[in-house]
Image (cartoon, helix red, strand yellow):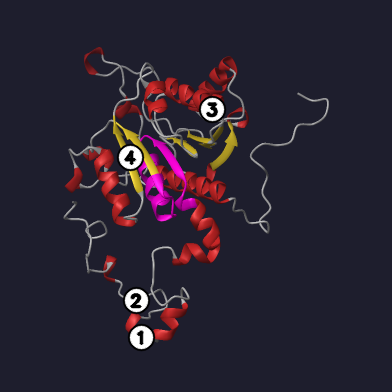
Amino acid sequence: MLQSLPHIVKGAAAPRHGIEGNLMGEKDADVPAEARSARNGQGVETATDRLRIILGQERLDVLASSRVLVLGLGGVGSNCVEALARGGVGELVLVDRDIVQPSNINRQAVAYHSTIGRAKTDVMEEIVHDINPDCKVTTVHRFLSKENLVPTLEALPRPDYVVDAIDTISQKLIVAKWCQDRGLRLISSMGGANKLNPERLRFSTIEKTKSCPICKVMRKECRRRGIKGLQVLYSSEVPMPVTPRGAELPGGRRPEKGVTLGTMSYMPPIMGQMIAGRVICDLADLRNDLDVQEPIVAPRRRGGR
């Protein structure tokens, strides 16, 4: 277990940030017992009380019986998994090959000084089970290459939803085609590196994306491979110039990922939370009809392309 993390260690009594009461300054001892009981109508406070108010028991049951496959446990994937677990999803299949590195600490839900050197899949499983002990977790500690990706996915139980939070474009395309061919719902995360403004994040189909270097390549390759209507989360913000394109490093080396791709602490977690929100609402068939938003896929006009 992660002994130095009070929010992970079971039975930890110390309140986070020293806040003992609720946002109104009340401590549980100050709230009458009948009022506490009325919070859930049963007299026993549970982890799903606040979810039940919005979702209702029937939708909670749907989420509890749902299986979500998350590919990649980096900044986006790990924070997405945490939100899915807190949101009541009953089964998670987690695939990642990495171990926690010091450079992960600024953005990844699995990354603490106490977890450096551990497999991300192992840490993530512990976090999920401490949030929801009843959640079934399957972990695969493996690098998803172009050669083993499809066999690995085929060997896993069929998911109700797939979250692609991996970095490599060739693998993202394989995942998109695999999901399309099998009629699986998928959200693919695009790039958040070298970007500052979370308000520029949006859901779209890949065909309607703009100002994202990864999306530009994905659009071209999706057309070539016959992948249509791929649902993505992307940022329309133009990336900040960090290292000049094609710049040489000392000794004639080319820039590596760790040199050219910087990440703000808040961007990947927000992306992961947004994806989790979309997955949960889709699985539960939940939407706010009072909040008018444009659909992800706009209806085609007659006679148009």
Q: Which x, y percent locates residue 60?
A: 50, 57
Which residue sits at x=52%, y=35%? Answer: 186
Q: Position of residue 215 (x, y in %)?
A: 52, 27
Which dot marks residue 138? 4
Can you identify the residue that label 3 sits on? 182
Q: CA distance from mark 4 to mark 1?
A: 42 Å
Closer to us: 38 or 119: 38
Which mark is first along the chain, 1 or 3? 1
Spatial CA distance of label 2 from label 3 is 49 Å
Circle 1/circle 2 CB separation < 8 Å: yes
Q: Earlier in the sequence, mark 2 or mark 3?
A: 2
Badge 3 amino acid: Arg
Q: Amino acid at mark 2?
A: Gly
- Which tag is nearer the camera, tag 4 or tag 1? 4
Residue at the limit of the structure toward the right, as seen here: 303
Q: Position of residue 5 (x, y in %)?
A: 21, 56
Marking on residue 21: 2
Marker disc for residue 30? 1
